[in-house]
Amino acid sequence: MVTDVLKNATADMQKTVDGLSHELAGIRTGRASPAIVDNVLVEYHGTSLPLKQLANIAVPEPALITIQPWDRGSLKTIEKALLKANLGLNPSNDGNMIRLTIPALTEERRTELAKTVGKRVEERKVALRNIRRDYISKVKQMEKDKEISQDEMESTVKKIDELTDVFVLKTSETGQAKEKEIREL
């Protein structure tokens, strides 16, 4: 029973850290990455589809993303979706593909992005602490219901605390790596 609680806590905390990594991948640095356009939804034949389901997305150069739709008729709608997504990038349509040139970041924009990263990291740390609180209350309830002994409860609470510390550290490291990437010229 206690092992299930620890497994579930670990899984929930890992999902939180993975979600942060995915979220931070979408933050634009001075470098091109297909993750920048991951969350772009395109209206295609009456349904909203992710851009990656409608086109081949490539990064041929460090500051360029190319988007080549499988259906050339969808070029205009993809271009509109990119503008609507408010990525801060201007799509260039040549009739065959769309090019997104990633401009160099200003120092002011780098600082702003670093603050955004810090804010997202802090939100994930709060989420990890909430997961910790929920699992500790479950363990205490198990002890209250006489499903586990007080010693088991105390050792499990200690393990959950240690687990939380590990994942908070991972979250901090992920944020620091992204901030370093943003600050690189």
Image: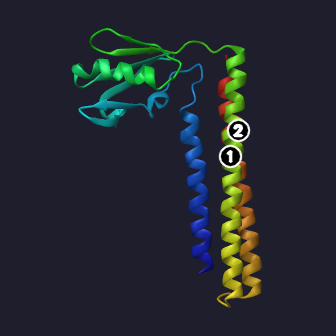
156 and 39: which one is in front? 39
Mark 2 neighbour class, 10 Å CA radius: few under 14, some 14 to 19, many 20 or more:
few
Mark 2–mark 1 Cα distance, whole angstroms, equals: 6 Å
Total numbered labels placed on residues in the image: 2
Q: In which quadrant is the C terminus drawn?
A: top right
Task: Give me the disc on residue 133.
Answer: none
Q: Is residue 109 found left or right of 45 in the rendered image?
A: right
Task: Please give the residue where the numbered disc 1 appears in the rendered image.
Answer: 123
74 and 23: which one is in front? 74
Task: Please give the residue where the numbered disc 2 appears in the rendered image.
Answer: 119
Q: In which quarter of the image is residue 8?
A: bottom right
Contact (Cβ within 8 Å) of mark 2 with mark 1: yes
Q: What residue type is labelled 2?
A: Lys
Element class at badge 2: helix
Q: Is residue 163 found left or right of 60 in the rendered image?
A: right
Q: Is residue 45 found left or right of 86 in the rendered image?
A: left
In percent of the image, x 22 and y 20: which residue is there? 73
- Counting from the top left corner in percent of width and height, residue 86 is at 50, 23
Q: What residue type is labelled 1?
A: Glu
- Counting from the top left corner in percent of width and height, residue 161 is at 75, 65
- Counting from the top left corner in percent of width and height, residue 170 is at 68, 48
* Residue 184 seen in this snapshot: no
